[in-house]
Amino acid sequence: MNFKKLMLSVGLSAMALLAMPGSTLTSPVSVQAAAHEHILETYITKQPTCTATGTEIRKCQTCGKITDTIKLPKVAHSVKTRTVRKATTTHTGVAETYCVVCQKTIKKTSLPKLTKKCAHTYKKTDTIPATCTSKGSITVTCKKCGTLISEKTLPKTKHEYVTEVTKAPTLTSVGQERTYCKNCTKTLEYNTLPKLEDATALSQDSAELTIGSTLQLTLSPTNKKVTWSSSNRAIVTVNRNGLVKALRTGEATVTALYKGQKFTCDITVKDIECSHEDTEEVILRDATCTKNGLEAVRCIECGKDLDMITIPATGHEWETVVSKKATCDKDGVSYEKCANCGTKKRGSEEVIEASGHKFTYKIVRRATTSRTALVQESCSVCKKKGASKVYPAIEFKPQLNLKAKTLPAGNEVKILIRDESGSVLSCSKKLSDMDKAYYGKVIKWSSSNPDVATVDSEGNVTAVSPGTAKISVKYYTKTLSCIITVR
């Protein structure tokens, strides 16, 4: 039954009493509603828009009283870009960015005149981020003519909720906290915070600990937001949950602070009685190239550091780094750098001399009896071209003294190379490397069937067994042959 129904019921009861025979109303009747705690519900009475703020109220579900009125900020414009007037070759165009909800123009952009049909080569991308209350967009337009090429709508983002205490609880009344979006301030929910309870005592006011041991302190009742602290963190530490840890011998006081009240526990830390028989080496700080490290000899049983050992600095480990490579015609640069820490060695820069060109020769055009030959020099590394050389056309027409010959097995015959006049041509001419690249070997003899007849480097043919063989000779660029028949 709500408050209004309660009052109506009381009023009707009073009227009924007056209507009864013999009843007398001696004085006015005053009915006072009992005090109660508000049970609040949130209502948005006016939604915010991009042109006007909104309103949110908090109203008691029992008595209907409005306890709070919250102003909701305007939401962001939901914008798009459109071409109002296209640019032509005679006048500029106009593009505008506007809100699709309220139609307000956010900005206008002038579009330049067109010199010819635009290919939309240069594009511009405008991004309007989405929010939790409005969608965003990505528009691509032509920088030159302003034509809208593409448009993509970005969905709304999620609300980012945070919680704040709108009314702190006390010992006599409950509190309240509000969860809302930190961007648009939309309320998700209200939660009631329970009344505070008085703290009574710390679980203990003194304790003896040994190095490395822990102690859990609690404040009764235990469901409190307590601030813990230590008077000497080098001796004992305490975390936010009241867990105390002993670090070294000595005395310290742990304090629990709650609502201005202080509760303390005096802690005495003693050393552990230990023979320190089992130890281990623990690196506390690694050595670097330039700084010493530190190593502790620690007791495995009690954790006490029995000795400290200095780890010498390792020193730099230099390696050569090429910062600029040398080329065929330009010097390079190198320096020394530490492979571990990256330090550059002072004064270590050195010049790497240019390697020089490595020229090779390529036949561009081979010689014949009617044209010259052309050989081009080029670097095999950088491909730079060098000198070129022209070779004369082949002036001779070599021929063999024999075109065919029949020999008994075991007999020999010498084949000679002659020119047009019949003179024997020399086979011992020496060529330069460049000449060889063009001409190849001066002379090269071969047999098509060495089992029938063989030939040496001087043109001497030996008949081996019955059959037919073709003896060929390559003289410069010409290939000549003779048929040998062995019987």
Image: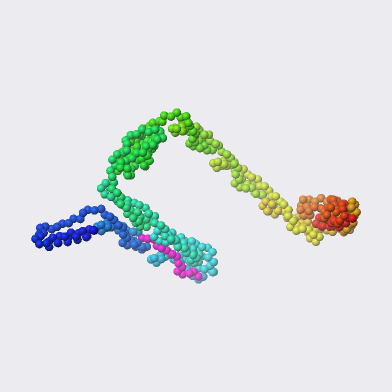
Q: Is residue 203 shown in magenta?
A: no
Q: Is residue 16 visible?
A: yes
State the residue in front, 60 or 55.
60
State the residue in front, 331 or 153.
153
The image shows residue 266 at horizontal and vertical percentages of 33, 34
Q: Is residue 65 visible?
A: no
Apparent side of residue 139 relative to residue 329 in the rendered image (left or right)? left
Quick one: which residue is furthest to the left in this view?
Answer: 22
Instruction: Identify which residue is drawn at 32% across, 53% down.
Output: 191
Apparent side of residue 385 relative to residue 128 in the rendered image (left or right)? right
State the residue in front, 78 or 295.
295
* Residues shaded magenta: 74-88
Instruction: Identify which residue is drawn at 54% across, 38% down.
Output: 289
Instruction: Identify which residue is drawn at 35% across, 57% down.
Output: 186
The image shows residue 5 at horizontal and vertical percentages of 22, 60
Determine the image quadrant of residue 19: bottom left
Q: Is residue 84 shown in magenta?
A: yes
**Above-or-below relation of 416 to 146:** above
